[in-house]
Amino acid sequence: MTEHVRHAPAQRAATVYQPAPIAPIPAAPIVLATGPVPAVQSVQLPDGRIVTGYALSPHAPAAPPVARPVVSRTAVNLALGGIGFAAVCGGLLILTSFIAALAAFVHQLIILAAVIFGGAVAVRVLGPGHGEGGTVVNIGRAVFKRNHFHG
């Protein structure tokens, strides 16, 4: 078995590492808050140590927050615009439906007038009394044989 031997701190081999220097990275300038620099204050602790630092000023109470509406004005304006747009679209839909129905009604009236007046014209032109005597054929006793008329 191997015995563990304690060496005095001076007898230990020390390894020293030398870090490679890092090239500085250009950073954006830091903008600090402007205002008076607070005074430096030192305090001696009971064990004799001295701690130096900036004195903290008492915090001023923050101003009460400004009362804001529950819903933003932009949201209200967008909602009202959407309602107005929907109303306009609905109105245009009703208007176009009315125009289409009116056009169909006028079309039906034109057809009805053509049927009535066309029939009246046909009766006057082709009706009895305007011919100069015609031949009247009585086909009540006619004979049809093999789809031929024998009269």
Image: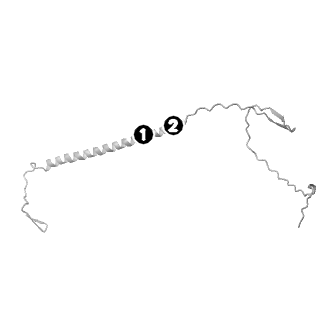
Residue 91 shown left or right of residue 11 in the figure: left
Q: Which residue type carries mark 1?
A: Ala
- Residue at 50 percent across and 37 percent down: it is 77
Q: Secondary structure at mark 2?
A: helix
Q: Residue at x 22, y 47 (%)?
A: 114
Question: What is the number of the mark on residue 76?
Answer: 2
The x and y percentages for residue 58 are 73, 31
> Tag 1: Cα neighbours inside 10 Å, few (<14), some, or many (≥20)?
few
Looking at this view, is 133 or 86 the one in front? 86
Q: Secondary structure at mark 1?
A: helix
**Amino acid, disc 2:** Val
Residue 112 in the image: x percent, y percent?
23, 46
Q: Which of the pair 19/7 is nearer the observer?
A: 7
Label whose residue precedes the other's in the sequence (1 or 2): 2
Which residue corresponds to mark 1? 87
Q: Which mark is residue 136?
A: none
In this picture, residue 128 sits left or right of residue 52: left
Is residue 76 toward the left or the right of residue 88 in the image?
Answer: right
Using residue 33 as the reference point, say whether residue 147 is left or right of it.
Answer: left
Q: Position of residue 22 (x, y in %)?
A: 80, 50
In this rendered view, identify the residue nearer to me: 75 or 96: 75
Which quadrant is home to the N terminus? bottom right
